[in-house]
Image (cartoon, coloured by chain):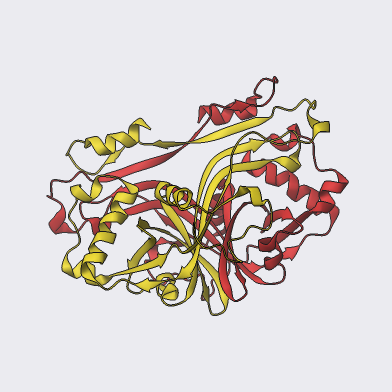
Chain colours: A red, B yellow
Amino acid sequence: MAATTDRTTLRRLPDRGAHDRETIHAILDAGLVCHVGFVHDGRPAIIPTGYARVGEHLYLHGSRKNRALLATIGAECCLEVTLLDGIVLARSAFHHSFNYRSAVIYGKGEEVTETEEKERALERFVDQVTPGRAADCRLPSEKELRATLVVKVPLDEASAKIRSGPPKDDAEDMELPHWAGVMPVRDAWGPAEPDTEIPLPEYLKEFERR
Amino acid sequence: MAATTDRTTLRRLPDRGAHDRETIHAILDAGLVCHVGFVHDGRPAIIPTGYARVGEHLYLHGSRKNRALLATIGAECCLEVTLLDGIVLARSAFHHSFNYRSAVIYGKGEEVTETEEKERALERFVDQVTPGRAADCRLPSEKELRATLVVKVPLDEASAKIRSGPPKDDAEDMELPHWAGVMPVRDAWGPAEPDTEIPLPEYLKEFERR
């Protein structure tokens, strides 16, 4: 279990909260984009960015001049990943909702300076999005490695929130003449838009079959 | 044009920035979930939630005890919407990227207390997600209206960021034997999961055809 702190204890709808590592890892591993929350001049800011999970850390990367990334080093930040699973259509406007899985991590960023750890993280950024891709591209040169800032945040203070299943209408609304149920969101990709004569490799065809 | 402030001026890759109202409105109107960034006990926090745009404001809603929402009233917050359009697969790991459209708004939340404005916003929350739905559900009762906190944030300080098109590899990498191009993300929905005997109405069948 990740540590349950004041910030990761859900006050509202506590049945939607989950803190076990497997749940949190699964959400993080299924996501592509995370939202980095940080404080800039005392005010909140959010930047969307790619990420990679390696073990018990979430890794971020960007240019050495990336203000959001720099703002997380040694300072409190918040990383958030949301997977939208469906629209929940209730008979009443009031009970409309989303089915979703989300994970939130609070912690301080730490710059990754060790070359091997940095290389492993940069390969994982590619494979997080497209499994198999790190073995099919030119890996970073020394110069590119130096130009890239990699920051990691531990998953120590993390929580998940999940809603699934049908709408929950009030008993007195059940006979109203409105369709009710869930409209699921599906992962759908392609067709691929090639920038090359090379045929689409098998691990990328997997996306088109989703 | 929305006001360009220090926070909404992109320092990195300024060609990706856009500040015209039409672009920002189009991104906000296409999104379903926004990320609310706020400061809680001096530390950054992010909550994902539904939203609605009405004119030059973004509306949020939730329980009267919703901590994130309460934290935005009269205080600086950040609202962020990201639409992922595709995975950009370059020949080098370094130039891998996403095609996306994102909008970020900085401002202070204001509680909406006027009944008519609140009702209009609550109808819009439903129609933002499923156009046509507000006319096909039970609208909020007086009791539900009272139980719902609605907050609006002006779009005065807003910006958009967009990446589109093929990968941009270095000239010396162009002959490498790796597939390169874009794997687009498509909106895909359904099949609907009914919680009723009522047939799926036409405006919801639209989702299944996407």
Q: Is residue B61 above or below residue B204?
A: below
Residue farthest to the bottom, as pictured: B41
Left or right: where does residue A173 sit relative to residue A115? Answer: left
Residue farthest to the front, as pictured: B1
x and y, in percent, of residue B100 in the image = 55, 44
Query: Which picture quadrant has residue A153?
Result: bottom right
Q: Is residue A131 shown to the viewer in this render? A: no
Left or right: where does residue A57 sit relative to residue B38? Answer: right
Q: Is residue A99 above or below residue A189?
A: below
Residue farthest to the right, as pictured: A142
Q: Is residue A26 shown to the viewer in this render? A: yes
x and y, in percent, of residue A209 in the image = 52, 27
- Return the residue nearer the eye: A14 or A44: A44
Query: Which picture quadrant has residue B150?
Result: bottom left
Residue at image location 25% in from the left, 71% down from the top: B147
Left or right: where does residue A207 sit relative to residue A18? Answer: right
Residue at image location 70% in from the left, 59% down from the top: A66
Tally of numbered tags: 0
x and y, in percent, of residue B73 in the image = 41, 75
Classify the position of the N terminus of chain A by image quarter. bottom right
x and y, in percent, of residue B104 in the image = 52, 58
